[in-house]
């Protein structure tokens, strides 16, 4: 290769490497330099900026709401396949397999997942047999606090029943009615519940004891007479195609609209609900964007999902190294804490305790790859 050819190749490579960055900068400069007439936007400038704003608002709304989108993907994917209702509890009776598309597949236990809307049922009772382990979560996938302040979400060995089973009463937001005795009382911040359960097998060639344990679960409205309660159904989810992944297109916003209508003000702060209102998602109002806006929202959802995947591949977020060991690539999926150790202070709400803000990117990092969290999942005490 001649020197001229070498220099030409190097120059071409340099341009190719610089191309994307230059293109991005040109795009940003193009927006910054859109024409104004006498310090007023032209009609074309206004249209361009409003479309751009809609895209960015939708992208940010998706990323902010990713825990909800994660839960909604599981709920709707499950109910489309197995049916809906407080009494429907799909069980992966031959363990979870590749037919189930979900963020955290795990075939080491028997899984069951159910979804309940207390806006329809009122307070709900969950009866668990001994030796079951699970988590009761709201639709943000926050572990639901238990009266007494010691437990959050957990059922079973790490929960208030210590693995003995019992009756768990889940109350909706703002509940002011009587609370009967004889229950472990959980107070949810959303009407919609995600019930995530595990049972354990001793022999992978005989899963029937673990499945049988799961089929002892009961879920029913507190105020419904026993004779009127629906019989529990435990459809076998193993080997059945189901898409329980977070939706990554316009459907994600349609699902959020369903949830906003169900939850109203209990879903989020005014600022959070304002993010959704910016793109037309408001409780009690129609959500029917025109074809052009729908296309922008669809592109925004696809972009936001890919952005979440990019964040999820990072081993460092906000200057915090998420690796457990610096010379390896094992990461701690809830590492919004200090150094690992028995005294670490875990905040499962992704709140920065020092400054008081929500750590959005670490939350995105978690919920693009995982679902469900509770103190029991991060306990370093054997058996707890």
Image: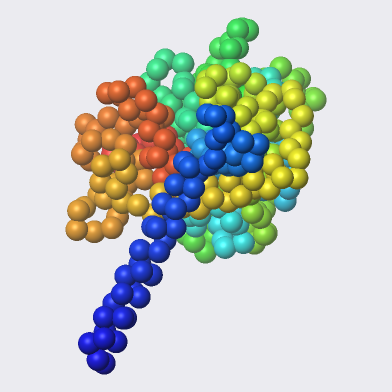
The image position of residue 321, as x and y in percent, is 25, 46
In the displayed structure image, the side of residue 120 where residue 380 appears, left or right: left
Residue 174 is drawn in which quadrant?
Answer: top right
Q: Is residue 9 above or below residue 58?
A: below
Q: Residue furthest front?
A: 38
Q: Is residue 310 left or right of residue 116?
A: left
Vertical side of 13 occupied by 367: above or below: above
Residue 130 showing in the rendered view = no
Image position of 177 with respect to 135: above or below: above
Which quadrant is the N terminus positioned in? bottom left
Of the pair 327 and 308, the residue shown nearer to us: 308
User: Which of 305/374 is in front?
Assistant: 305
Evaluate whether residue 269 shows in this view.
yes
What's the coloring here?
Answer: rainbow
For this rendering, which residue is in front, 165 or 115?
A: 115
Query: Residue at coordinates 73% horizontally, 48% vertically from top-left?
Result: 80
Q: Residue at x 54, y 29 (%)?
A: 38
Instruction: Point out residue 317 in the picture as x, y percentages from the top left corner.
Output: 32, 44
Q: Residue 30 at what x, y percent from top left?
A: 49, 47
Q: Which image quarter: residue 286?
A: top right
- Which residue is drawn at the image coordinates 21% and 31% (left, top)? 343
Q: Position of residue 149 (x, y in %)?
A: 40, 17
Please state which of residues 258 and 160 is positioned toward the viewer in this rendering. 258
Residue 125 located left or right of residue 131: right
């Amino acid at each position: 290769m001649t020197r001229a050819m070498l220099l030409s190749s190097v120059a071409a490579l340099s341009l190719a490497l610089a191309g994307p960055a230059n293109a991005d900068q040109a795009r940003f400069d193009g927006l910054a330099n859109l024409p104004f007439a006498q310090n007023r936007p032209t009609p074309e400038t206004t249209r361009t900026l409003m479309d751009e704003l809609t895209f960015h608002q939708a992208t940010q709304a998706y990323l902010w709401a990713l825990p909800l989108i994660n839960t909604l993907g599981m709920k709707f994917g499950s109910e489309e396949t197995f049916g809906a209702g407080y009494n429907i509890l799909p069980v992966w009776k031959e363990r979870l397999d590749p037919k189930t598309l979900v963020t955290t597949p795990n075939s080491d236990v028997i899984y069951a997942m159910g979804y309940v809307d207390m806006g329809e049922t009122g307070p709900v009772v969950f009866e668990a047999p001994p030796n079951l382990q699970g988590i009761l979560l709201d639709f943000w996938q926050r572990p639901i606090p238990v009266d007494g302040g010691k437990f959050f979400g957990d059922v079973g060995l790490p929960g208030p029943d210590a693995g003995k089973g019992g009756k768990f009463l889940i109350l909706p937001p703002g509940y002011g009615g009587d609370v009967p005795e004889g229950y472990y009382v959980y107070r949810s911040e959303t009407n919609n519940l995600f019930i995530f359960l595990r049972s354990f097998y001793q022999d992978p060639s005989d899963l029937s004891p673990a499945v049988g344990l799961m089929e002892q679960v009961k879920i029913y409205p507190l105020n419904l007479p026993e004779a009127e309660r629906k019989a529990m159904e435990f459809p076998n989810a193993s080997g059945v195609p189901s898409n329980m992944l977070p939706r990554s297109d316009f459907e994600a916003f349609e699902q959020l609209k369903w949830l906003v209508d169900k939850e109203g003000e209990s879903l989020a702060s005014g600022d959070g609900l304002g993010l959704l209102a910016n793109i037309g998602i408001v409780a009690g109002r129609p959500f029917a964007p025109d074809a052009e806006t729908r296309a922008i929202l669809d592109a925004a959802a696809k972009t936001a999902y890919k952005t979440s995947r990019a964040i999820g591949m990072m081993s460092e977020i906000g200057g915090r190294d998420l690796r457990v060991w610096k010379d390896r690539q094992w990461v701690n999926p809830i590492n919004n804490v200090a150094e690992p150790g028995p005294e670490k202070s875990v905040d499962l709400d992704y709140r920065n305790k020092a400054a008081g803000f929500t750590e959005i990117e670490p939350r995105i990092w978690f919920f693009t790859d995982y679902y469900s969290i509770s103190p029991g999942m991060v306990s370093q005490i054997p058996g707890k």
